[in-house]
Amino acid sequence: MQKFFSQMNATLITIGDEILSGNTVDTNSTFIAEQLKNIGIKTVQIFTISDEVETIKKTLKLAFEMSDLVITTGGLGPTKDDRTKTAYKEYFNDVLVLDEATFEHLKQLFIKRNREYLLEINKDQAVVLSKAYIFQNFNGTAPCQMVEENGKIAICLPGVPYEVKPFIKKQIVPFLQQKFKLPFIESRIISVVNYPESLLANDIESWELNLPKHISLSYLPVGNRVKLRLSASGDNLQDLKNDLEKQVKEVFDIIGDRVIATNEDKIEQILHDVLIKQKLTISTAESCTSGELARLITSVSGSSNYFISGIVPYQTEKKIEILGVDKNLIEKFTVVSEEVAAEMAEKCQDLFKTDIAISTTGVAGPNKGEDGNETGTVFYAIRIKDKTENFKLFLPYLDRGDFVNFVSQKIIQELVTLLVANK
Amino acid sequence: MQKFFSQMNATLITIGDEILSGNTVDTNSTFIAEQLKNIGIKTVQIFTISDEVETIKKTLKLAFEMSDLVITTGGLGPTKDDRTKTAYKEYFNDVLVLDEATFEHLKQLFIKRNREYLLEINKDQAVVLSKAYIFQNFNGTAPCQMVEENGKIAICLPGVPYEVKPFIKKQIVPFLQQKFKLPFIESRIISVVNYPESLLANDIESWELNLPKHISLSYLPVGNRVKLRLSASGDNLQDLKNDLEKQVKEVFDIIGDRVIATNEDKIEQILHDVLIKQKLTISTAESCTSGELARLITSVSGSSNYFISGIVPYQTEKKIEILGVDKNLIEKFTVVSEEVAAEMAEKCQDLFKTDIAISTTGVAGPNKGEDGNETGTVFYAIRIKDKTENFKLFLPYLDRGDFVNFVSQKIIQELVTLLVANK
């Protein structure tokens, strides 16, 4: 029989020194929390701890005090002393046994990879808790172990994100959905641009105060955009949808002129929807963003319907030779200038024959540009049909990686704003 | 007087529902942990908690039980109820006061941004703990507050990564270095390719067991590469360097033929070093990685010395028109094929006149390719001078974003392996 939870809580435990030493970003927790949220399970806390038996045991105890579901990732590698497994064994007062099915699964994996000689070293990975239910790993060696005790569940996963994702999506989430009757969760994300967060909060204050109890609101600022997330939970999905629809309409009456999307979350997905709807194609000519803009636009499934081509004419000479930018223009205004950005967009549109062309030229740093332009200076141009809009940014405090990403996000946001206004 | 720590521990607390709801990846903790590690402070635990006064207070207590330094990020936004500040106030038994210097700083910021009308709403951000030492925020509105009590330190930062990074780098790290005499930390990262982690561990086992006490080893697998990190701490920097040098030489004798770098960590930085040393230039023609390869290569400062240009001929037609790939070849073998990848690399080299050219063609998914190629199929070619090497990958289980990143990392690793072998 399914156990009913009006609100099921989860606690995540990330085990491993890679994250504590700042070497690796913890993307597993974000992914797991998001997937759990989608099926109505709320993540109340995440612990990132070192790979030590006593610490793991102590944290398992803390985690179960706040949640019915605890998911750990990491500490199962073949080179480690399997400290996570030992900690689980001691915490659950269990013994470790060789699981024949897992061993057979490993054997097949190594045969497939022509690495049978590795089997002995990895045999230990088929050793599991005697109480555990096993989910086989189709993308690596360590299986996932699930232990259920006193109505609470612990799930022990490896740490490699490429293994964690399919485990969660294909095995754990369906398992949890089948096992528990969970409340429905619906949310809507309203994207607002050119609206400082504090002013926005001020303007919608009275609406926010009147939100019904089962709907919560959060502000998520991303660059110059603020995402308002309305989240509702309850037993009737259609009711939730209607309730949210009503609130979206109400807030739209107040701030509608600054809203660029009321469904999608990511700016690249919003761009997808707008371009498909308006039947427009796009191309890019990137210097300082060096491929990030193309990557971001094409990170959406279905982008091949509108993204035609991109070029990264990094060296100034190639801007002239391949893209056809006028050499005199570069000499007159320098390569990092409004004039060159505008010409790059125009030439890009000519080259790839698209409705829209975007260009960037700037100095990502940490060194100054060849013509003495300051680090953090960016000129970009957005050409839609026969009209070019020019923009300038100055972001001296961002490091190189953040710089290209911030600029690319911002450009797509400006493009969407223009397209939505033009519609 | 400086207080001496032979080992100073830190605990980080990330406050905010954005991370617990899976909406945002926590990059702050990774950055802070790395920066602290560089000055000899060890991060022993990270808590990610919700924005509630009681939870924050409880976690501050837990954190101080394990560390002398606690850094919190988040929960200071103008739209929030300033719960972090309230929690600090209650935890430290303090009162909140308006700080005139901070208010003046805010005023100047809003004048600079032409947003003086926002001042009243944001005035609350100049309200701080009476005991706190204030670090002004040059990239946002909330200041950083530092409270010292009983020889322990709490640092309260906002949550926006673009604000956190400069705070840590330019203000907090110099402050900690000046205040405490910390041990030196030195590390070396040895990158090994084509060596399964379990086999590698087996082969270097006796060397690993004989490592001196003050040197620790960790294994960090990234795609098909394993990074061995040797980390030493002590009072004499030169001794540490010598000790590490000795160990690197010893392990090099065992696994040297699989080592591609003994200094740098990131594969794109290793590529930088190899290309600068061998005086080679590079260009890219990307289809399925759609800009990520160019972005990754140019993410290194100084990459303009060797990266000449990239092209993303996403649409098949553009591969023919702009890059000059033979139409018949595409018809015969389909666009996702070894033959087309090889021709793309050759044409890319012709177009941009570089020593090296790399090409990718494949199906990022989630849908099949236009010619029925399976999702996850990638052909790539690496052309160095007049020789092309062809490669195939099949990665059906990765999602779109992971796919382009994994493939790009893998390609750069293969390129480095080829260049190091050719030297």
Image (spheres, coloured by chain):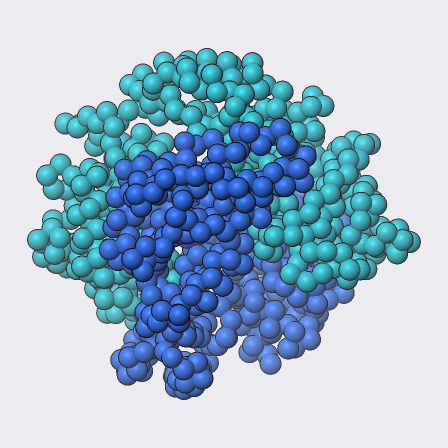
Chain colours: A blue, B cyan
| Residue nearest the observer in this picture, B241 or A402 | B241
Q: In the figure, B208 relative to A402: above or below?
A: above
Q: In the figure, A132 relative to B254: above or below?
A: below
Image check: A104 left or right of A152?
Answer: right
Which residue is at a point 58% across and 69% down the rendered structure image? Answer: A271
Residue A168: image location, x then y, percent: 49, 56
| Residue nearest the observer in this picture, B61 or B412 | B61
Q: In the figure, A144 relative to A294: above or below?
A: above
Q: Which quadrant of the structure image shows residue A56?
A: top left
Q: Which quadrant of the structure image shows residue A207?
A: bottom left
Residue B400: image location, x then y, percent: 60, 56
| Residue nearest the observer in this picture, B337 or A5 | A5
Give the quarter of the figure containing the C terminus of chain B: top right
Image check: A409 left or right of A156?
Answer: right
Q: Which quadrant of the structure image shows residue A49?
A: top left
Q: In the figure, A166 relative to A42: above or below?
A: above
Residue A380: image location, x then y, percent: 58, 59
Which residue is at a point 31% across and 46% down the rendered structure image? Answer: A92
Give the quarter of the figure containing the N terminus of chain B: top left
Which residue is at a point 28% across and 24% down the rendered structure image? Answer: B183
Image check: A166 left or right of A255?
Answer: right
The answer to whether residue B120 is seen in the rendering is yes
Image check: B63 left or right of A90?
Answer: left
The answer to whether residue B128 is seen in the rendering is no
Residue B157: image location, x then y, percent: 28, 51
Which residue is at a point 53% across and 72% down the rendered structure image? Answer: A417
| Residue nearest the observer in this picture, B158 or B245 | B245
